[in-house]
Every structure is written in structure tokens, then in C-alpha cells.
């Protein structure tokens, strides 16, 4: 196994990425600030396998120094760090005028952490222990949403046998074109932008339809059913558009 030296941001890997139509463009770089060595190593290796250039920092001070002195496309930031906490690092990064997307790793027991993190300028959070695939999906979603992306970058998204062209508003399943209504496409896009998150019917109504209130929740159910029909291999046993009993829906890439 190859371990990269800490602080080595220049490992250039050609990204074999499904989401990247322009194969000649530079791979995205991620700064991983995490004090648990085992997690730092495994997560770093996984992200490199996904084609990212990864630099690591083992505490908050080192993390902030790197974030402030090197350009990164995204920062994964643990909350519980020795010395300067993840919250302080996040605040300091924003105070320094950096808009780099920040994804925070919070402990499940501390629900207050999520709110606090988002209030001080984090863009998303994942609770520990997390599923690495979900974390990777969240990172991809954050990078896609990041401002100032070059045109043409990251407009393809793939899950299961489904391939979605987000700019061309087209989708295929197993290579065959799938016809989606404008509303279905907006719903699909919202799911893709929020992988692994539990989305209530009310949130989907507000974000996708622009309605508030709960009068039209049946509309959401009908559209999710339609996405399952068109995009799942077996709509009766969905693997991607999941029902969260009593709460809403969850997209799992
Ligand atoms: Ca920690």
C-alpha cells in the first residue's frame, strides 16, 4: 500500500470519473482535516481512488494553514479536533475570505453540531459513522453546486444503470433514452443534489414545485412513483429512490 506524505497536494491522478466528461481537465483537490489517523488514511485512499488529489491535515491549526495557503476545491473538516476545533477552523476559513465548499464530519449524538456548522459557513455535513459511498456522493454534489465551475464541467451524473445529462436535461437507463417531464427532471435533480439526505414531502413541494403547505403531498408521491417506474430496474423494490417511513424520501446513488 502506498501512503502519501502528509501535506503532499501534488499527486496528480487522472480521474477515471463517471461525472467528468472532460477528461483532460485537472482533477479536483480535497483537503481532509481529520485527527483520527486510521480514518484519515482510509478516507484519503478512497478519495484518491475516486480520482481526487488529496492533502491531509491532522489537527485544526495545520488544517487552517493549508486551507489558507493552498487552493482546494473542497474541504472535509472533522468537528472534534485537538487544538483549534473544526468549528473554529470553519469560521477562520470564512473570515479569511475563502469560499471553498466545506463538508463537516459531525458526531451523530450531537445534533446541535449540524446546525452550528451550517450557521458558521459549512456547506454540508455528514454524521459519523458514515457510509463512505454516501460521503463521496455528497462531495460530488457539493462540487457540482460550487460556483465558478467551468462550463461543460460536471454535467453528467450516473447511478445504477442511469445516466443523467444535467445540462441537456436528458436521461438514459441502460443506454436507452428515458422520457422525463420537466417536473420529474427537477425532482430528479433535487434528489441528485441531496444524496443520502432524508427529504420530507413538504421540502420537495417547496423546492421542486414552489408550493408551501401540505395540500399536494400526493403529487410528490406520484412523481416519485413515476421516477421509480422510469429509472429503477424494479419499481416495486426501489434501490435508489427510497421511502423513509413517516418522513419522506431519500435518494441513494
Ligand atoms: Ca476527530
Image (cartoon, rainbow, N blue to C red):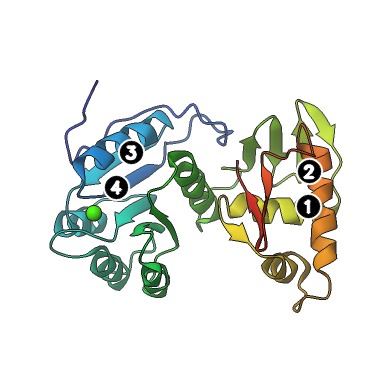
Of callouts 1 and 3, the N-terminal one? 3
Please provide percent x and percent y for residue 95.
29, 73
Name the residue that disc number 4 marks.
32
Name the residue that disc number 2 marks.
228
Q: Is residue 7 left or right of residue 113?
A: left
Tag 4: Cα neighbours inside 10 Å, few (<14), some, or many (≥20)?
many
Of callouts 2 and 4, the N-terminal one? 4
In the structure shown, which secondary structural element does the residue marked by tag 4 occupy?
strand
1 vs 3, front mark? 1
Please provide percent x and percent y for residue 20.
55, 35
Taking the spot 67% from the left edge, 38% from the top edge, the residue there is 239
Name the residue that disc number 3 marks.
43
Disc 2 CB within 8 Å of nearest ligand 1 atom = no
In the picture as drawn, the residue positioned furthest to the bottom comes out as 213
Using the numbered discs, state the Cα–Cα distance from disc 2 to disc 1 in whole angstroms: 6 Å
Q: Nearer the viewer, residue 171 or 238?
A: 238
Q: Is mark 1 in CB contact (under 8 Å) with mark 4?
A: no
Please provide percent x and percent y for residue 138.
49, 49
Please provide percent x and percent y for residue 166.
69, 46
Q: Is mark 2 in CB contact (under 8 Å) with mark 1?
A: yes
Using the numbered discs, state the Cα–Cα distance from disc 1 to disc 3 in whole angstroms: 33 Å
Using the numbered discs, state the Cα–Cα distance from disc 2 to disc 4 in whole angstroms: 35 Å
In the rendered image, the quadrant that contains the C terminus is top right
Q: Is mark 3 in CB contact (under 8 Å) with mark 2?
A: no
2 vs 4, front mark? 2
Q: Is mark 3 in CB contact (under 8 Å) with mark 4?
A: yes
In the rendered view, tell whether residue 40 sits above or below residue 128: above
Name the residue that disc number 1 marks.
224
Using the numbered discs, state the Cα–Cα distance from disc 3 to disc 4 in whole angstroms: 9 Å
Using the numbered discs, state the Cα–Cα distance from disc 3 to disc 2 in whole angstroms: 32 Å
Amino acid at each position: 500500500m502506498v501512503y502519501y506524505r502528509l501535506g503532499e497536494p501534488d499527486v496528480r491522478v487522472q480521474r477515471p470519473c463517471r461525472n467528468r466528461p472532460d477528461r483532460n481537465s485537472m482533477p479536483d483537490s480535497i483537503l481532509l482535516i481529520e485527527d483520527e489517523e486510521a480514518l484519515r488514511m482510509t478516507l484519503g485512499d478512497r478519495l484518491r481512488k475516486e480520482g481526487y488529489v488529496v492533502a491531509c491535515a491532522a489537527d485544526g491549526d495545520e488544517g487552517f494553514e493549508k486551507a489558507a495557503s493552498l487552493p482546494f476545491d473542497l474541504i472535509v473538516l472533522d468537528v472534534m479536533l485537538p487544538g483549534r476545533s473544526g468549528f473554529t477552523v470553519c469560521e477562520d476559513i470564512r473570515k479569511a475570505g475563502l469560499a471553498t465548499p466545506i463538508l463537516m464530519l459531525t458526531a451523530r449524538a450531537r445534533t446541535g453540531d449540524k446546525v452550528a456548522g451550517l450557521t458558521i459557513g459549512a456547506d454540508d455535513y455528514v454524521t459519523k459513522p458514515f457510509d463512505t459511498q454516501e460521503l463521496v456522493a455528497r462531495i460530488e454534489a457539493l462540487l457540482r453546486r460550487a460556483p465558478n465551475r467551468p462550463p461543460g464541467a460536471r454535467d453528467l451524473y450516473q447511478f445504477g444503470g442511469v445516466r443523467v445529462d444535467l445540462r441537456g436535461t436528458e436521461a438514459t437507463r441502460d443506454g436507452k433514452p428515458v422520457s422525463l417531464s420537466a417536473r420529474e427532471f427537477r425532482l430528479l435533480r433535487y434528489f441528485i443534489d441531496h444524496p443520502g439526505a432524508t427529504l420530507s414531502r413538504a421540502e420537495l413541494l417547496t423546492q421542486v414545485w414552489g408550493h408551501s403547505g401540505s395540500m399536494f403531498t400526493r403529487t410528490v408521491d406520484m412523481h416519485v412513483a413515476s421516477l421509480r417506474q422510469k429509472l429503477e430496474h424494479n419499481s416495486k423494490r426501489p434501490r435508489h429512490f427510497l421511502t423513509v417511513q413517516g418522513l419522506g424520501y431519500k435518494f441513494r446513488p
